[in-house]
Amino acid sequence: MNLSRRTLLAAGSATAVTAATTLMTSAGAAHARPVAAASGEAAATADFDTLLRRAETLLTGGEFDPADTDFTAALAALSTTAEGLWEAFDRSAGRTALWPDLAPLTDPGNFGQSYTRLRTIAVAWATAGTSLAGSTEVADALVAALRFTYDTAYNPAKRETGNWWFWEIGAPRALMDCSVILRDRLPAADLTDYLSVVDRFCPDADRRTNSPSLAETGANRTDKAVIVALRGLLGQDTGKLASARDALSDVRDSGRNSLFGYTSSGDGFYEDGSFVQHDVVAYTGSYGVVLLGGTAYLLALLAGSEWAVADPMVSVMYEAVERTFAPVIFDGLMMDSVRGRAISRERAGDHRDGATAVAAILLLATGAPAEYAGRWRALVKGWLTRNRTTPFTALATLPQLALAKAVLNDPTVKAEARTTGTFVFADMDRVVHRRPGWACALSLSSKRISAYEAGNGENLHGWYTGDGMTYLYDGDDLGQFNDGFWPTVDPYRLPGTTVDTRQRTDLGTGTGTSTYRPTNAVAGGAVLDGRYGAAAMEVIGAQGTTLRTKKSWFLLDNAVIALGAGITASDGRPVETIVENHNLGTDGSNRLLVDGVHQPVEQGWAQDFGRARWAHVDGVGGYVFPEGTALHALREQRTGTWRAIDTGADTGGSTDPVTRRYLTLRVDHGVSPTDARYAYVLLPGASAAATAVWSHSRPVRIVANDATAQAVEVRRAGLTAVNFWGAGTAAGITASGPASVLVQRRGGHVLVAVADPGRTLTTLSVELPFPVRSVVDADDTVSLVPGRRPVLTVAVGGSRGHTHRAELIQ
């Protein structure tokens, strides 16, 4: 079984203890300072055995009720996986590798994966009830395999080649886990050797070993801190334990790369809830989860000891659960818009990365202050009880399952309803709009945040994932992006994108990872009252196309209004906007209505509709075209393989064909269009009747859709929303420059939200078309000149595209 390195790392670092531990904190401790002195005398009194037993429990889960069917199912899954690895395990005297598919062993990807497989067998050996539990033969074979791998491939005399991650994180973490489990059986000389190889390739968490001038950040720093802590326990080295703890706060560099602080550039957590890794990639759902899990692990592992984390800024990690992670978790699924190149990993998926995040949150809750832990458990209970498509119990390890069941079985924990609200994560070019029954996520990009990341053979077809791809999540259909979507979807027709139809070559086929950042400045938007949003992105096509597009999304109570203007290209190729490309599963035949007329359900059916007003797909929702549009509809059955999009050394997919049915709705702008446009409305979960009524009643009016401004009015809500592409007037509102503006009149009060998503201005003036007398409340950046045509002046410079708010009175 060839498991993903990130899946394995997350499973290893985010597993849960069966009993809650108490996190030792000190309100008086200074940020980025050691919280306990390391000394030779401390080693004499340190209870290393206690922490080693805790580390083992974090891997195995400890004791459990054998009568509980959830535990027995998880136990059976572990046993089956470990048995399969054991049976294929080469234990012969003349072996050259541990598994035939991981030869030669000297390849970093192969010895890295060999260690993770050995860890799986070791966990099964240490877990009562598996077929391998307590076997002397298994233990002896594991001890011999660790020795063989050290002698053959991974020892201090070796030089790093290939992917540094295997040398400095993947292999040493799995090796330390194996050593924790087998510590009573390992010869002292062997353990000394394994500690020495960790000292060679991961001596501390502060620096990249193969590039000592490079400070570790984000998830990589956490990963290494865990490795150093385990090495310290196994070697009874108090200095290593202190080093691991202090790395979280980055004591070495005075907190510059602390995981317990907010950043304004590069890797880490941002105050707006964004999480970035690799400097320019929105990575909450992958590296962010690894960071969360690794930190939770260390907090739990070291709790109550003299090395317990006492940095008061750990509150940043607590706040991240609701600020950073909860908005992008939908019923336990991690939104793909923040999973980066991990979308191409067959053995990851939104459900598995989501489950890993849930496990990390549960583990963090074991030592968090009660006011945090209580809210998190309610959130988790809601996620777990609503997700019947991919239940957590079917994905969790035994230790993860223990904490989840404790929450599920606790009648005092009330399941929290779905998160609702609008979130513009300006620092990572992502927008999430959540309503009680559905959610919409927008994946944007700019010269600040990459359109995609690819490399090491991963995410080969991610060309358009950052060009405004629109993800719709429905509480009744949690399998949309989880059920073979990425290997089968047409990568040129991702929902929400406007694309040149040119042929593209595979991305990321070489070693290392790389990103692509377009040249546009505008990507982001503004939020009004946490309920409504205006998002914008200027698409400037990559090298090889002249395509330019101005795109807007207006996020409302029951609808998403999508507008496009200025669509221009001169390359002699067709340009398309993809309204929908819905995965119908293996045999879906969801009924399609266009203007109330039933359309055929046969695969391969295609039809052009000259002036469609609305469409509806059963089980999905409605689509309204306020201006009428030339709509192209297509039913097709698509076959692909995971291998075609991921050939990574430890993440590469299988060559088994995957077939899914799709229903595509698109607008064709023709060959080399000039100043073309589109307008459509998404009505997630709406019935056909409701869609028809919406089309006829037009509760939202499009008042501008051109290269100067895109704007809508929702008269019933008293709401006007505008994306200005330059100085101009729309819907009676005048702006002095490019901006996102939302205005809502409620009785005698006026709510205003303004942002500069292009980050090109210092100040912005906004003139309103009705009288205002005074300010009730406003951000410090907002000032008002009242009158019949009041003017707001907003100091947007340096605000990095975030929203400025004001409440006025008429």
Image (cartoon, rainbow, N blue to C red):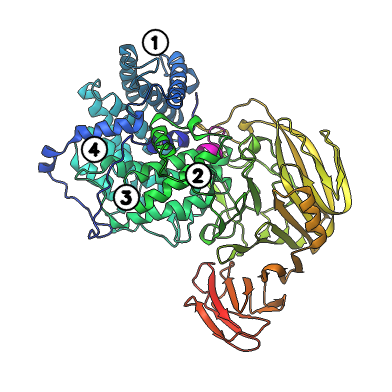
Q: Position of residue 361 (x, y in %)?
A: 41, 44
Residue drawn 28% across and 36% down? 230
- Residue 350: in magenta span: yes
Magenta range: 346-352
How much space separates mark 3 and mark 4, taking CA atoms?
A: 15 Å
Where disc 3 sits, the SS reads: helix
Percent x, y of residue 221: 36, 47
Q: Is 743 placed left or right of 136 in the picture?
A: right
Q: Reading the chain from its start, which is encountered first: label 2 or label 3?
A: 3
* Residue of label 4: 232
Question: Cα distance, mark 4 to mark 2?
Answer: 38 Å
Q: Nearer the viewer, mark 2 or mark 1?
A: 2
- Most foreground residue, 676 or 403: 403
Give residue 481's position: percent from left, percent from top.
Answer: 63, 40
Residue 248: image tag: 3
Q: Nearer the viewer, mark 3 or mark 1?
A: 3
* Residue 69 left/right relative to 731: left
The three-letter code of the residue at mark 2 reads: Gly
Label 1 Cα crowd, 10 Å radius (few <14 / some 14-19 / many 20+): few
Q: Which residue is mark 2?
A: 382
Residue closer to the observer: 418 or 570: 418
Q: Residues within 10 Å of mark 4 (few under 14, many from 20)?
A: many
Amino acid under label 4? Gly
Q: Examine the rendered structure and indicate whether residue 287 appears above or below residue 709.
A: above
